[in-house]
Image: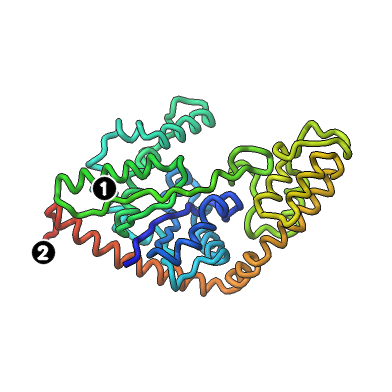
């Protein structure tokens, strides 16, 4: 029996290179070895987009298209929409009784994100909602509803998995062995930098290349990428480690990246030439993904059918889990 993997992505925008190299590329490999559930986490997206539901709704299909375009195979994996599985919301309520507010506020991931919100809004956190603080409880429901045994995450997400494990242990201790305790499947890929040199490529930062960006957009973005600021003239030597153009040459594994590095250090390569070469290589790199994505863009009914079938399959699994949970907590009336 294959182990079950559960992971998800928030539909707040299309998938960019940061998502691809940081997570989704690995999902394509995992689906061959694991029983894989890929969740489009629209409910979680609403925790900080509750005032813009249209944004979330419009990106559900876009995320599905991107996942299919990179190689997620609906015959091997289950792609589903979180909000269409009411059992997740029900589990979240039951689990919320097992976690104190103090514990939620101690979660390092939550603490970091609350601090970021305070910096953005310039207050003491009044803008932080119950839903936002409590999303680790909802995430625990996501994982356990589908009996997830492994959860692919980066190091910054480990506290969320540990909180899920705590909830499972407490539930099983009180009500009897019912739930599976998941383990983190740690991603080896580090966070991908943005075109502006920021340590994180992000939708809100405007420093991302999206998998389905057209050639004109890719060209404009790369031509504006940050290079070594110490290189003033075309023939000045430069440090490739301070240049985002070389960073992306290395990321997409350009054939002559060693030569590019050498020429950059010697000062025999100008930044404009280097950017134009990266544009060409990036377009070629993204071409297979974009061709596959174009098919699904032109056949939205195929995407919808995949989402409906995946959600139906996911719901059947969640229903079975819910039966066991309700029996354990003795609210299985008339079943």
Q: Which residue corresponds to the image point at 45% horizontal and 33% vertical from the top-left? A: 112
Q: Position of residue 239 (x, y in %)?
A: 75, 36
Tell me which corner region of the image, top left, top right, bottom left or bottom right, holds residue 311: bottom left
Q: Which residue corresponds to the image point at 42% horizontal and 55% vertical from the top-left? A: 7
Residue 334 is tagged as: 2
Horizontally, is 213 left or right of 159 in the view? right
Label 1 environment density (alpha carbons within 10 Å; few <14, some 14–19, many ≥20) = some
- Circle 2 — which element? loop
Which quadrant: the C terminus?
bottom left
Residue 93 is tagged as: 1
Which quadrant: the N terminus?
bottom left
Q: Position of residue 91 (x, y in %)?
A: 27, 52
Q: In 3D space, how far apart are the residues under numbered discs 1 and 2 (Cα atoms)?
A: 21 Å
Q: Position of residue 158 (x, y in %)?
A: 40, 42
- Circle 1 — which element? helix
Do the CB atoms of the residues marked 1 and 2 lie less than 8 Å apart? no
The residue lying toward the viewer, choosing from 303 and 15, is: 15
Q: Is residue 241 above or below residue 324?
A: above
């Amino acid at each position: 029996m294959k182990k079950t993997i559960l992971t998800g992505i928030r539909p707040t925008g299309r998938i960019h290179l940061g998502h691809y190299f940081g997570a989704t590329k690995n999902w394509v490999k995992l689906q061959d070895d694991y029983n894989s559930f890929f969740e489009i986490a629209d409910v979680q997206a609403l925790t900080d987009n509750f005032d813009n539901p249209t944004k979330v709704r419009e990106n559900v299909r876009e995320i599905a298209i991107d996942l299919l375009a990179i190689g997620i195979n609906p015959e091997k994996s289950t792609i589903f929409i979180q909000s269409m599985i009411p059992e997740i919301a029900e589990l979240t309520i039951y689990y919320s009784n097992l976690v104190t507010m103090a514990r939620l506020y101690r979660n390092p991931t939550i603490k970091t994100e609350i601090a970021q919100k305070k910096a953005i809004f310039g207050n003491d956190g009044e803008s932080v909602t119950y839903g936002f603080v409590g999303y680790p409880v909802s995430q625990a429901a996501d994982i356990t509803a589908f009996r997830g045994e492994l959860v692919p995450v980066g190091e910054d997400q480990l506290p969320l998995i540990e909180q899920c494990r705590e909830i499972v242990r407490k539930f099983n201790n009180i009500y009897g062995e019912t739930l599976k305790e998941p383990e983190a499947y740690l991603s080896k890929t580090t966070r991908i930098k943005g075109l502006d040199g920021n340590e994180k490529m992000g939708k809100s930062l405007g420093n991302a290349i999206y998998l389905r960006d057209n050639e004109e957009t890719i060209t404009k973005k790369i031509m504006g990428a940050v290079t070594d600021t110490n290189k003033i003239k075309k023939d000045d030597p430069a440090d490739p480690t301070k240049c985002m153009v070389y960073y992306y040459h290395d990321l997409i594994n350009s054939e002559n990246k060693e030569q590019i590095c050498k020429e950059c250090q010697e000062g025999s390569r100008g930044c404009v030439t280097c950017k134009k070469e990266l544009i060409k290589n990036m377009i070629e790199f993204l071409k297979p993904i974009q061709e596959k994505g174009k098919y699904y863009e032109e056949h939205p009914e195929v995407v919808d059918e995949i989402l409906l079938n995946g959600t139906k399959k996911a719901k059947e699994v969640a229903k079975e889990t819910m039966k066991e949970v309700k029996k354990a907590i003795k609210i299985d009336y008339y079943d």
